[in-house]
Amino acid sequence: MIKRLAFIIFIILTLSFCLIAWAQPKRLLVIDTANDYHHRVIPIAEKVIKNLAKQSGQFSVDIVSTNIELKDKLSSQGLARYDAVMFLNTTGELPIPDMAAFLQWIKAGHGFIAIHSAADTLHKQPEYFDMLGGEFQEHFEQVPATVLVADNQFPATKMFGKEVNISKEEFPLYKNYSSQNHLLLYLDHHPNRRLPGFYPISWCRNYGQGRVFFSAIGHRAGTWKSHLYQEHILGAMEWGLGLVPGDCSAAPNPPAEQQQDNAASTSQTASTKNG
């Protein structure tokens, strides 16, 4: 009788511990360190992300802007406290203490969420782009665009339907786009020259057991103030944190004849970076 009672108590305590652990909010580390161009929209984006976390109630956010803080938070000991990391409009080379350890941390089952110029970061670290699935090449002036939705079931794109009209944004071009990406958003023409082609805007991918998400959108203040865009970012964060499911298996992309010819694009960059 005593043994049976002890076993029942053990089961109750175990279940209670599991429920408490399950109920603990996830933790997201947001890095917005800019060691090259600094986007003026970052303070607005920080506020939006904090509000989204508060509204969700399912995760908390820590924000890091300096190189000193970054070194501490992205150390092995620092990463142990988080479920996902977001690179928010980062630029330049970042002093990540151990890149191999950081990538292994993602691969082990954590999330990585990359926004806008996160693809214009760490150009001296090719392994970073192997993980991300694409690298910034160039951009032109900001323009309006009708962005096509390749997957309207994914948490970060289900709010868009078949397409989404964006009044004005910066749409960079990317090189080394991986065939292992799961395409989410794209343009079927050059954003500025209007010539037909394939121009990826957002994608996700499996990275070992980890979850990787990228969205090129996020340069302008008006974008971050849009409720529709905020839903896009919230869906990305919730998926990256493992709070909601989403299929990111490699998916067929548009036909080869629609693929962007990176070699043919010019090296001209935008003369204005306001936003």
Image (spheres, rainbow, N blue to C red):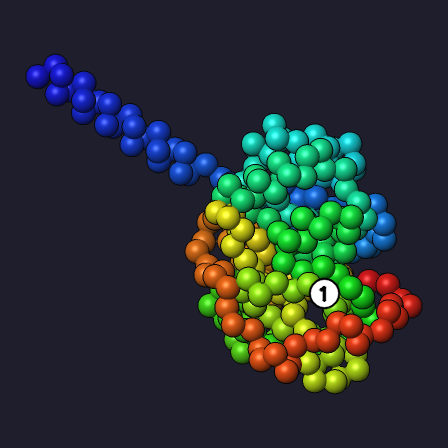
Q: Quadrant of the N terminus?
A: top left
Residue 80 vertical position relative to residue 267 in the rendered view, above or below: above
> What secondary structure is marked by label 1?
strand
Q: Name the spot of residue 219 as percent of width and height, x first.
A: 76, 62
Query: In this rendering, would 224 be left or right of 163?
Result: right
Residue 224 vertical position relative to residue 104 in the rendered view, above or below: below
Which amino acid is tagged 1? Lys
Q: Residue furthest top?
A: 2
Could you tell me which residue is drawn at 78 percent across and 32 percent down? 68
Along the line of sight, the residue nearer the viewer: 94 or 165:
94
Residue 153 vertical position relative to residue 25 in the rendered view, above or below: below
Graded by Cα atoms within 10 Å as few (under 14), some (14 to 19) or many (20 or more), the crowding at tag 1 reads: some
Could you tell me which residue is drawn at 67 percent across and 60 percent down? 134
Q: Residue furthest left?
A: 1
Q: Quadrant of residue 6?
A: top left
Could you tell me which residue is drawn at 45 percent across and 54 percent down? 244
* Residue at image mark 1: 175
Along the line of sight, the residue nearer the viewer: 225 or 25:
25
